[in-house]
Image (spheres, helix red, strand yellow):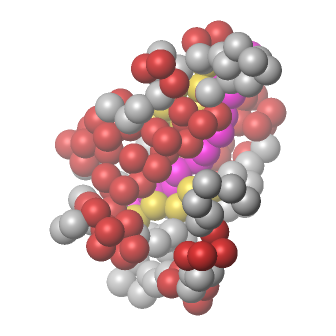
Amino acid sequence: MDFITLASERYSVRKFKDKRLEKEVIEKILKAGHIAPTGCNYQPQRILVLESDEALEKLKVCTKCHFDAPNAMLVCYNRDECWTRKYDGAQSGSIDASIVATHMMLAAFELGVGSCWVMHFDPAAMKREFSIPDNIEPVALLVMGYPADDAKPLNLHSQYRDINEVVKYNRF
Protein backbone atom coordinates (compact mmCIF):
# COMPACT_ATOMS: atom_id res chain seq x y z
CA MET A 1 0.00 0.00 0.00
CA ASP A 2 1.41 3.42 -0.86
CA PHE A 3 1.93 5.88 1.98
CA ILE A 4 -0.91 8.32 1.14
CA THR A 5 -3.39 5.44 1.02
CA LEU A 6 -2.08 4.03 4.31
CA ALA A 7 -2.21 7.44 6.00
CA SER A 8 -5.71 8.25 4.73
CA GLU A 9 -7.25 4.84 5.48
CA ARG A 10 -5.84 4.56 9.02
CA TYR A 11 -8.34 5.70 11.64
CA SER A 12 -8.66 5.74 15.42
CA VAL A 13 -10.09 2.39 16.45
CA ARG A 14 -12.22 2.45 19.60
CA LYS A 15 -13.67 -1.05 19.43
CA PHE A 16 -11.49 -4.15 19.45
CA LYS A 17 -11.70 -7.90 19.20
CA ASP A 18 -10.93 -9.78 22.40
CA LYS A 19 -7.60 -11.03 21.07
CA ARG A 20 -4.12 -10.06 22.19
CA LEU A 21 -1.46 -9.10 19.69
CA GLU A 22 1.15 -11.71 18.90
CA LYS A 23 4.72 -11.08 20.09
CA GLU A 24 6.00 -10.79 16.50
CA VAL A 25 3.40 -8.12 15.72
CA ILE A 26 4.29 -6.15 18.85
CA GLU A 27 7.97 -6.34 17.94
CA LYS A 28 7.32 -4.99 14.42
CA ILE A 29 5.34 -2.06 15.85
CA LEU A 30 8.10 -1.36 18.36
CA LYS A 31 10.72 -1.53 15.59
CA ALA A 32 8.86 1.22 13.71
CA GLY A 33 9.07 3.41 16.83
CA HIS A 34 12.70 2.50 17.39
CA ILE A 35 13.78 3.73 13.96
CA ALA A 36 11.73 6.94 14.07
CA PRO A 37 13.68 10.19 13.78
CA THR A 38 14.33 12.18 16.95
CA GLY A 39 16.10 15.47 17.65
CA CYS A 40 19.82 14.97 16.84
CA ASN A 41 18.99 11.24 17.00
CA TYR A 42 19.29 11.35 20.80
CA GLN A 43 16.45 8.81 21.02
CA PRO A 44 14.94 9.90 24.35
CA GLN A 45 11.80 7.83 23.80
CA ARG A 46 10.80 5.20 26.32
CA ILE A 47 7.95 2.85 25.49
CA LEU A 48 6.03 0.90 28.11
CA VAL A 49 4.24 -2.15 26.64
CA LEU A 50 1.04 -2.91 28.53
CA GLU A 51 -0.24 -6.39 27.79
CA SER A 52 -0.89 -8.28 31.03
CA ASP A 53 -4.33 -8.32 32.62
CA GLU A 54 -2.85 -6.56 35.66
CA ALA A 55 -1.32 -3.77 33.55
CA LEU A 56 -4.53 -3.25 31.59
CA GLU A 57 -6.50 -2.96 34.85
CA LYS A 58 -4.00 -0.37 36.12
CA LEU A 59 -4.48 1.51 32.86
CA LYS A 60 -8.19 1.87 33.64
CA VAL A 61 -7.24 3.80 36.79
CA CYS A 62 -5.39 6.33 34.59
CA THR A 63 -7.91 6.90 31.79
CA LYS A 64 -11.49 6.25 30.83
CA CYS A 65 -10.36 6.15 27.19
CA HIS A 66 -8.95 2.62 27.26
CA PHE A 67 -11.75 1.26 25.04
CA ASP A 68 -11.14 -2.19 26.57
CA ALA A 69 -8.22 -2.61 24.18
CA PRO A 70 -6.33 -5.89 24.63
CA ASN A 71 -2.95 -4.13 24.31
CA ALA A 72 -1.55 -0.67 24.89
CA MET A 73 1.76 1.15 24.64
CA LEU A 74 2.64 4.26 26.58
CA VAL A 75 5.10 6.43 24.67
CA CYS A 76 7.22 8.61 26.94
CA TYR A 77 10.49 10.52 26.78
CA ASN A 78 13.44 10.93 29.11
CA ARG A 79 13.81 14.63 29.97
CA ASP A 80 17.53 14.11 30.66
CA GLU A 81 18.22 12.83 27.14
CA CYS A 82 16.40 15.32 24.92
CA TRP A 83 17.98 17.64 22.44
CA THR A 84 17.60 21.23 23.66
CA ARG A 85 17.34 24.24 21.37
CA LYS A 86 19.95 26.79 22.46
CA TYR A 87 17.88 29.86 21.54
CA ASP A 88 15.09 29.34 24.04
CA GLY A 89 15.76 26.08 25.89
CA ALA A 90 12.89 24.22 24.22
CA GLN A 91 13.31 20.46 24.41
CA SER A 92 12.47 18.01 21.65
CA GLY A 93 11.13 15.27 23.94
CA SER A 94 7.38 15.58 23.40
CA ILE A 95 7.91 16.05 19.67
CA ASP A 96 10.22 13.04 19.52
CA ALA A 97 7.70 10.90 21.40
CA SER A 98 4.94 12.09 19.05
CA ILE A 99 6.96 11.14 15.97
CA VAL A 100 7.66 7.72 17.51
CA ALA A 101 3.95 7.22 18.30
CA THR A 102 2.96 8.19 14.76
CA HIS A 103 5.40 5.70 13.26
CA MET A 104 3.98 3.02 15.54
CA MET A 105 0.35 3.78 14.64
CA LEU A 106 1.05 3.65 10.92
CA ALA A 107 3.06 0.43 11.23
CA ALA A 108 0.27 -1.09 13.30
CA PHE A 109 -2.31 -0.24 10.63
CA GLU A 110 -0.17 -1.81 7.93
CA LEU A 111 -0.11 -4.99 10.04
CA GLY A 112 -3.92 -5.04 10.42
CA VAL A 113 -3.79 -3.67 13.97
CA GLY A 114 -6.09 -0.84 14.98
CA SER A 115 -4.96 1.85 17.38
CA CYS A 116 -6.14 5.03 18.99
CA TRP A 117 -3.84 7.80 20.22
CA VAL A 118 -5.08 8.78 23.67
CA MET A 119 -3.90 11.95 25.33
CA HIS A 120 -6.79 11.97 27.80
CA PHE A 121 -5.00 10.31 30.71
CA ASP A 122 -3.72 11.38 34.11
CA PRO A 123 0.10 11.54 33.88
CA ALA A 124 0.51 11.44 37.67
CA ALA A 125 -1.65 8.31 37.84
CA MET A 126 0.39 6.71 35.04
CA LYS A 127 3.61 7.45 36.89
CA ARG A 128 2.18 6.06 40.13
CA GLU A 129 0.51 2.95 38.70
CA PHE A 130 3.49 1.93 36.54
CA SER A 131 6.35 3.17 38.76
CA ILE A 132 7.58 5.59 36.10
CA PRO A 133 10.62 7.60 37.26
CA ASP A 134 10.34 11.38 37.65
CA ASN A 135 12.55 12.12 34.62
CA ILE A 136 10.30 10.09 32.28
CA GLU A 137 7.36 12.03 30.81
CA PRO A 138 4.31 10.20 29.38
CA VAL A 139 3.12 11.75 26.12
CA ALA A 140 0.90 9.36 24.17
CA LEU A 141 -1.06 6.29 25.09
CA LEU A 142 -1.65 4.02 22.12
CA VAL A 143 -4.45 1.58 22.84
CA MET A 144 -4.41 -1.15 20.23
CA GLY A 145 -5.64 -4.48 19.05
CA TYR A 146 -7.39 -6.10 16.15
CA PRO A 147 -10.40 -3.96 15.16
CA ALA A 148 -13.83 -5.40 15.95
CA ASP A 149 -15.82 -6.41 12.87
CA ASP A 150 -18.09 -3.39 13.36
CA ALA A 151 -15.30 -0.87 14.14
CA LYS A 152 -15.45 2.20 11.96
CA PRO A 153 -14.01 5.71 11.83
CA LEU A 154 -15.84 8.64 13.37
CA ASN A 155 -17.90 10.78 10.99
CA LEU A 156 -15.29 13.55 10.81
CA HIS A 157 -12.46 11.17 9.88
CA SER A 158 -12.42 11.99 6.16
CA GLN A 159 -13.34 15.65 6.35
CA TYR A 160 -10.44 18.02 5.74
CA ARG A 161 -10.11 21.76 5.52
CA ASP A 162 -9.12 23.07 2.15
CA ILE A 163 -5.36 22.70 1.84
CA ASN A 164 -5.02 26.45 1.16
CA GLU A 165 -6.33 27.13 4.67
CA VAL A 166 -3.54 25.14 6.31
CA VAL A 167 -0.59 25.63 3.93
CA LYS A 168 1.08 28.95 3.19
CA TYR A 169 4.18 29.64 1.11
CA ASN A 170 6.86 32.04 2.28
CA ARG A 171 4.76 34.01 4.81
CA PHE A 172 1.56 33.91 6.79
Residue 14 relative to residue 113: left or right: right
| Rendered view: 41 above or below 112 | above
User: Which sits in the foreground, 117 or 92?
Assistant: 92
x then y, percent, for residue 108: 33, 55
| Rendered view: 136 above or below 104 | above
User: Which sits in the foreground, 100 or 20?
Assistant: 100
> Is residue 73 something that shows in the picture?
no
Q: Write down the region rendered in magenta.
A: 134-146
Task: Give me the residue at 63% from left, 69% from top.
Answer: 166
The quarter of the rendered structure image containing the C terminus is bottom right
The quarter of the rendered structure image containing the N terminus is bottom left
**Which SS does the magenta portion mostly show?**
strand
| Rendered view: 50 above or below 39 | below
Query: Is residue 62 rendered magenta in the image?
Result: no
Query: Is residue 140 rendered magenta in the image?
Result: yes
Task: Give me the residue at 78% from left, 44% from top.
Answer: 122
x then y, percent, for residue 145: 39, 60
x then y, percent, for residue 82: 60, 17
User: Which sits in the foreground, 97 or 159?
Assistant: 159
> Is residue 158 something that shows in the picture?
yes
